[in-house]
Image: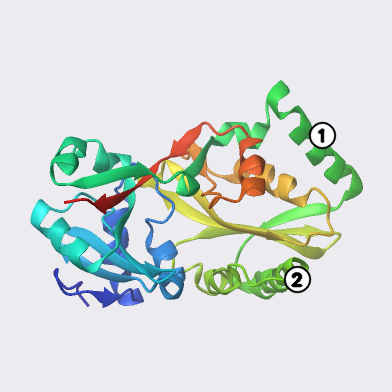
Amino acid sequence: MVLPCYPEFVPIHVAYQAEIQARLFQIPDGVSEYTFANLYLFRNRYKYRISLHKQSLIISGEREGKRFFMSPCEAPEQEIIRELFETHDYWKGISDSVLRPNQERFIQWGIEITEDRDNFDYLYLKTDLAQLPGKKYHKKRNLVSAFLNAYRHAEERPLSPEILPQAMVVLDRWREDKGAEGDYQAAKEALELFTSLGMQGTLYYINGSPAGWCLGEALAQGSIFAVHFEKAVDAYKGIYQFMNQTFAASLPEGFTYINREQDLGDEGLRQAKMTYRPWGFVRKYTGHYKP
């Protein structure tokens, strides 16, 4: 199947995986949403539909009763943007590589650009998360050490189809601990399809019992690894800090950065992400048409 040309949009389907991913993998910014896996796994939540315009992707979505469009690869021409604003409320997920060469033109075209801080992705040096060096990571090292002292028989295994049922047990326990659905459905499907979606992950055990797992994929031509899902049993104090460090240390040398996604405006999550001292952010912007 071949992606239809704009203005025709179709739902995201596995039949378009190769065509979509080949384009998204070349994007230099490393925006966590811009992978086939992420778009596919959240296709129902955001009602994603996709189209092709001059070899670039245009994605249409909906959230909280408002329609948005995204252009991950490059900015559409002025006429197309105006047409999109006729049927959409706003332009979402504008990256630096799309904004910077076009910012003056966007202003001339009547497009108001604002930072979308709640959706900034947190970007960390892989070596920082793997080694937790220096005074700034002293508390994190202590938490990991306390975890290893409390659970001396902690081990890790690369995620594989054979151990998927054990990862599912962790996911179900995570939902039970949280008392909320959260991204359970997307995480469940990610586990079921991780091989075909080109994702990789690790399952962690404590005293032989499955206790947590991480799952993600490569971005930005292989220089960034995005951690899309990280689930664990809350009863094991310090397990998230342990997984964070251990998973970072297990990634191949080709990865320079780790993208741990956005905080969505959750103040507690924002503080937690900041304690790991991000190297920087993958910035995203929102556009509104102000003729």
Residue tagged 2: 173
Frontmost residue, 248 versus 271? 271
Q: How many marks?
A: 2
The tag earlier along the polypeptide, 2 or 1, is 1
* Percent position of residue 91, x then y: 29, 56
* Percent position of residue 110, x then y: 17, 46
Frontmost residue, 79 versus 42? 79
- In the image, is residue 22 above or below residue 174? above
Left or right for 140, reference 230? right
Left or right for 222, reference 195? left
| Residue at figure coordinates x 56%, y 49% from the top left | 263
* Percent position of residue 97, x then y: 28, 40
Q: Residues within 10 Å of mark 1 (few under 14, many from 20)?
A: few
* Percent position of residue 279, x then y: 52, 31
Identify the image quadrant of residue 204.
bottom right
Frontmost residue, 154 versus 37? 37
Residue tagged 1: 142
Frontmost residue, 188 versus 11? 11
Q: Residues within 10 Å of mark 2 (few under 14, many from 20)?
A: some
| Residue at figure coordinates x 21%, y 61% from the top left | 85
| Residue at figure coordinates x 33%, y 73% from the top left | 12
